[in-house]
Image (cartoon, helix red, strand yellow):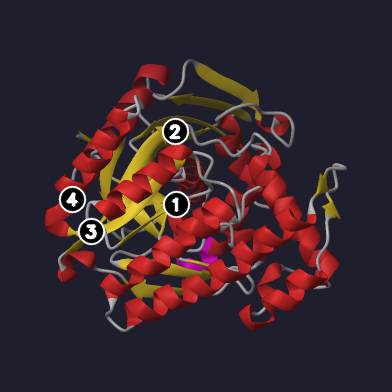
Amino acid sequence: MNQIPAWTTAEGAERARAAFRDAFDAEPAGVWAAPGRVNLIGEHTDYNGGLCLPIALAHRTYVALSPVDDAQIALTSRQEDGVWTAAVDEVGPGSVDGWPGYAAGVSWALAQDGRALGGYRAAVDSCVPYGAGLSSSAALESAFAVAFDDVFDLGLGADDDARASLVAACIRAENEVAGANTGGMDQSAALLSHDGTALLLDMRDGSRTHIPFDLAADGLALLVIDTRAPHQLVDGQYGQRRATCEAAAQRLGVPTLREIAPDRLEDALHDLDGVTLPDGTDVDADVVRRRVRHVVTEIARVEEFVGLLRDGRVREVGPVMDASHVSLRDDYEVTVPELDVAVETARAAGAYGARMTGGGFGGSAIALVEADAVDAVSAAVSAAFAERGWTEPGFLAATGDGAAARVETEE
């Protein structure tokens, strides 16, 4: 089985420092790290004003960074080739291709908010699986955000309320510079998570609640299955889902689909017909209704899931996870065969529940299992993939870890 280990803090920090030394022949001012995330429940609800429940991973992106005297940016990554350079004032929407947009886009967004930033150089290394739907992009943005906060003395990292400005800058970087029209769940998870909790986010009013999440105490584990099916959010499918939901909300006369109560769903669906998106695409009425049904029922599933956690009935969340995956497969149509097989196989091998996690169109699935069943469930999924001639999946265990922060080489 292909286990995906998380680096220790010391290992990750030293790897980033070494990358910085190799690229710039100097020592960085420091190293900062931010986690990837797994969303327990609440998919495609964030940009609809809904609820979601992510946890931070132990797997992190590490950034070694120093400010420089001139207004120049130089970036390098162990996951990419070469050194990318630009003047600070050259960065903006439409000006940066590829991964540097997620990094330099954060400094651009902070500057747009009136923050004083200068030039900098940075080196990146990461153990967050790339393309796995575990939010490697938000981990990258958030590690840069806390680095900028420290080296430019922005005063935004003191507590969760202050960090909301960093979250907003990361969202702008992803939406406007990198060109991925995502919501805000991923950045919130990377910057606001606490150890041993899941982060309940209400995207309508911005409130957040830390829900105790300690599976080990119950003899359970959350198995993450990286299907190795490529996960991309910039090919138009994600944006089309979002645009469809926004057009449906406008047709229904509400700010977001969050305003549609579950007991009013059927009436709302009856009132919906096809919509035309801003790019001129016509969306069939049946498709619009299925997209809306997923969002409204998924928000209700988050509430049910949280209620079960609070009552200590953790094993009973399995059917809620299962229902979420079915909705994402049939109504929102964002799964792929690898995700469906991973979920179905994990359930057949004894998981209490399983679902895709993240934006879909590839990426990862999660399964709630007994701690002593992790190997058996992993082996079953690996065998199912091998039977189909697919790339071997990767596996990691997820717990509720802490948020982005400065780290040291020595533990």
What's drawn in magenta, residue-wise?
A: 157-163
269 relative to 110 in the view: left or right: right
Give the amino acid type for the residue marked by disc 3 in the picture: Val
Q: CA distance from mark 1 to mark 4?
A: 18 Å
Q: Is residue 129 visible?
A: no
Secondary structure state at the residue bearing disc 1: strand
Q: Residue furthest top?
A: 82
Contact, mark 1 vs mark 3 (Cβ under 8 Å): no
Q: Is residue 292 above or below residue 12?
A: below
Q: CA distance from mark 3 to mark 2?
A: 23 Å
Q: Position of residue 4 (x, y in %)?
A: 26, 37
N-term mark: 2 or 4: 2
N-term mark: 1 or 4: 1
Q: Which residue is mark 1?
A: 357
N-term mark: 1 or 3: 1
Contact, mark 1 vs mark 4 (Cβ under 8 Å): no
Q: CA distance from mark 4 to mark 3?
A: 7 Å
Residue ID at (59%, 21%): 85
Q: CA distance from mark 2 to mark 4?
A: 21 Å
Q: Is residue 116 above or below residue 247?
A: above
Give the amino acid type for the residue marked by disc 4 in the picture: Val
Q: Which residue is mark 3?
A: 369
Residue ID at (50%, 40%): 336
Q: Position of residue 397 (x, y in %)?
A: 25, 50
Q: Position of residue 274 (x, y in %)?
A: 83, 56
**Is-magenta flag for residue 359?**
no
Give the amino acid type for the residue marked by disc 2 in the picture: Ala
Residue ID at (68%, 63%): 292
17 relative to 335 in the view: left or right: left
Contact, mark 4 vs mark 3 (Cβ under 8 Å): yes
Contact, mark 2 vs mark 1 (Cβ under 8 Å): no
Q: Which residue is mark 2?
A: 229
